[in-house]
Amino acid sequence: MSEAIGTTQGNDNFYLELQRMSMEFSSGGSPPEPSRVVAVAGKMEDSFNKYKDMISRLSLSQDFQALEYYALTVSNLKRENMVLSDIEDSVQWQINSMKAFATGQSPPMPNAKTVEMMQKKSGGSMSSPPTIVSTPFTGQEACFEDSTIRQTFLTLQSDHENLIRMGSGYGSFDPLGKLAYLDQMEKIEERWALLMTKLDLGQHISREFKDETSAFLGGMNLSVREFFELLETSKDWLRERANEGRL
């Protein structure tokens, strides 16, 4: 079940220890000491509680970017025929099993979905993919020496930043306002895609941004194409939620 357990970002020490214990035992070693198992289970439970708190805060946030990240998480799990509660049940079962082992008791029976996930070795993850903090362009690249291109870039950048600021109150918008905001966000994305394609700006993207993007996609186990498909699916999910508010 080690594949089924991830960590919230910055708390991977229990995961490494869990992998180490599993490898030692599978290679013919003795069962781990109960005290060692209890310690790992405690750290795992702490990380699990932080994960649940993070997911709850994302789902209840007023900010569009937080809600979009939540929608991405839900949509990504749906690709594997899972929901958030499946991940939570799977992780809680492993925590309870470790505690039972440490006290000499029989482990609890996993539910049917947890068994299915173990068989597929697709237990999902509590992990947060690495954050992208850089930007694709600084505005100082050679391609922006052309004043027209530079102004087009700066205008689009400003429009996007303004829309993001407006989205800080997305959760308080009425259903029609949410749908209108989603339309505006899609238009911004289309403008970026057009600018990138028309001017062939991909070759000028910073190495730092490429590296961070690669790490992010790797953390979600997605290709670039799959990510954009997932992004569309998450937008559809947000539209469905907005439309439900109109009923």
Image: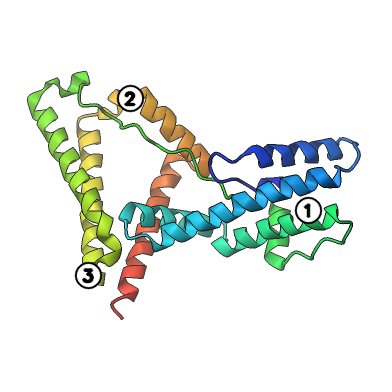
Q: Position of residue 162 (x, y in %)?
A: 18, 47
What is the x, y in percent for residue 233? 40, 57
- Is 201 on the left or on the right of 90, as rendered? left
Q: Which residue is mark 2?
A: 206
Residue 200 in the image, given as x and y percentages of width and height: 24, 29
Towards the viewer: 215 or 31? 31
User: Is residue 177 shown left or right of residue 24?
Assistant: left
Q: Residues within 10 Å of mark 3 (few under 14, many from 20)?
A: some
Which residue is labeled 1 in the image?
Answer: 98
Q: How is the image coloured?
A: rainbow
Q: Secondary structure at mark 3?
A: helix
Q: Residue at x 61, y 58 (%)?
A: 87
Q: Look at the numbered discs 2 and 1 and tell me whether their residues touch, using CB distance below 8 Å.
A: no
Q: Amino acid at mark 1?
A: Met
Between marks 2 and 1 in the image, the one whose residue lies nearer the viewer? 1
Horizontal and vertical percent for residue 72?
43, 54
Q: Is residue 161 above or below residue 203?
A: below
In percent of the image, x 72 and y 50: which residue is there? 41
Q: CA distance from mark 3 to mark 1?
A: 49 Å
Q: Is residue 123 visible?
A: no
Residue that label 3 marks: 176
Q: Mark 3 or mark 1, which has the lower sequence index?
A: 1
